[in-house]
Structures are given as structure tokens and as C-alpha cells.
Image (cartoon, grey):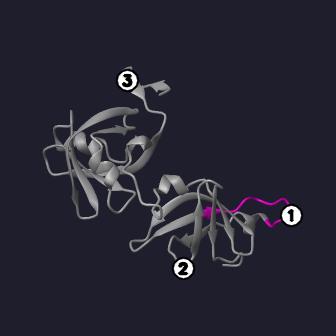
Amino acid sequence: MTDQNASGVQVPDDLAQVGFVFGAYGVAGWVRIRPFSEDADALLKVKTWWIDKPSLHDVEVKQCKLHGGDVVAQLAGVTDRNEAEALKGAAVSVPRSLFPTLSDDEFYWTELIGLDVENLQGEHLGKVTDMMSNGPQSILRVTPAALPEADPEVAAQERLIPFVEAFVIKVDKAANKITVDWGLDY
């Protein structure tokens, strides 16, 4: 742990954003969280979240549950709808060390961001700069590295690669690389 927040509480150095406050839920101060994963395990199992609004601070989770595709939660100190609405847009993070363990073929989005992406021909497609979901599957947002000889408009185009078995051949975290069946011209 390296930093302290305004109240002097140690901020974990492995915080990972797992969702954001989407709005209020009901009138008793509950918040609606849009999680970055389908099962929202990290949100449901960790009892202290870190929220960055108005500034980064820890908050005790009194109760939380899945509601549709979202998580609804009662947070300590948030007692009415106005206080819950004031948190809208806040990032919700938890220490990575508290994430539930996944099987070998499962990955948290935070583990994929920053990995290099290479196709089966050995061509470098760029780096995973973000992830998104279109409902049925997750999608890698790959930003190509700008090459000096490349056309700047072409080099800057983002690639959206579905994170499904048909296209993602191998994720090698040790090598910091994802191998995909995806052409340079896609």
C-alpha cells in the first residue's frame, strides 16, 4: 500500500476498476452499479469498495445483490436518493488481490488491458487499450502502434476483436501477448 486518501486511510496499490455507479436505485440511498463483468463476483464478494467521487475513498458495502445485469448496493453513509444520485458516474474499484480466483481459461478485463496483440502470421496488431461488451461477448479494443512509415490515419484506427474462441487463439500473460486469428486488413 502506497498512498493515503484524504481521511488518512491507506489506498491499496492494486486497485482495479470493476464498474461504475450508473445511478440511484429506489429512495433509500441504494446505488446501481454497472459491472464490467457478467457475474460481478468482485463486486458481490468484497465488502469494501473504493469510489472516486468526490475523491477516492473507501466505503463499506452493507448489502449488495444482482439486479438484472447490474449490481444494486446499500453503502454506509448513503442514506437517500439524492446522495445516491450524487455518486452517478463514480468509478468503483476493489483491490485486485481480493478478486475471486478464475479457472485457467478465464480472465479479468484488467488482466487483458495492456497486452500486445499479434495475429497468426506474426504481425503486430497493437495493444489492448480497453475492453467492452456488446452483450453476448466481450470485445478487445486494440489500438495499433503508430509506425513512422505508416499513414497516420490508418495507423490510428482502432480494431475491435471479439474475445471468443474463434478469433482468440491464445492468451499468454507471461509473454504479455494475445494471439488472434485476425488479419491486418480487417
Q: Hey, what amino acid is under mark 2?
A: Ala
Residue behind mark 2? 166
Mark 1 surroundings: few (<14), some (14-19) or many (≥20) residues within 10 A: few
Residue behind mark 3? 9
| Residue at horizontal 21 percent and vertical 35 percent from the top | 76
Q: Residue furthest front?
A: 104
| Residue 26 horizontal side relative to residue 7, left or right | left
| Residue at horizontal 32 percent and vertical 54 percent from the top | 41
Q: Quadrant of residue 113?
A: bottom right
Q: Nearer the viewer, mark 1 or mark 2?
A: 2
Residue behind mark 1? 149
Q: Which residues are magenta?
A: 142-151
Instruction: Calculate the distance from the C-alpha at mark 3 to the C-alpha at mark 2.
Output: 45 Å
Q: Hey, what amino acid is under mark 3?
A: Val
Q: Pick whichever, 112 or 33, lies toward us.
A: 112
Reply yes or no: does residue 144 show up in magenta: yes
Helix, strand, or loop for circle 1? loop
Reply yes or no: does residue 77 show up in magenta: no
Q: Hey, what amino acid is under mark 1?
A: Glu
Tell me the quadrant of the picture where the C terminus can be found.
Answer: bottom right
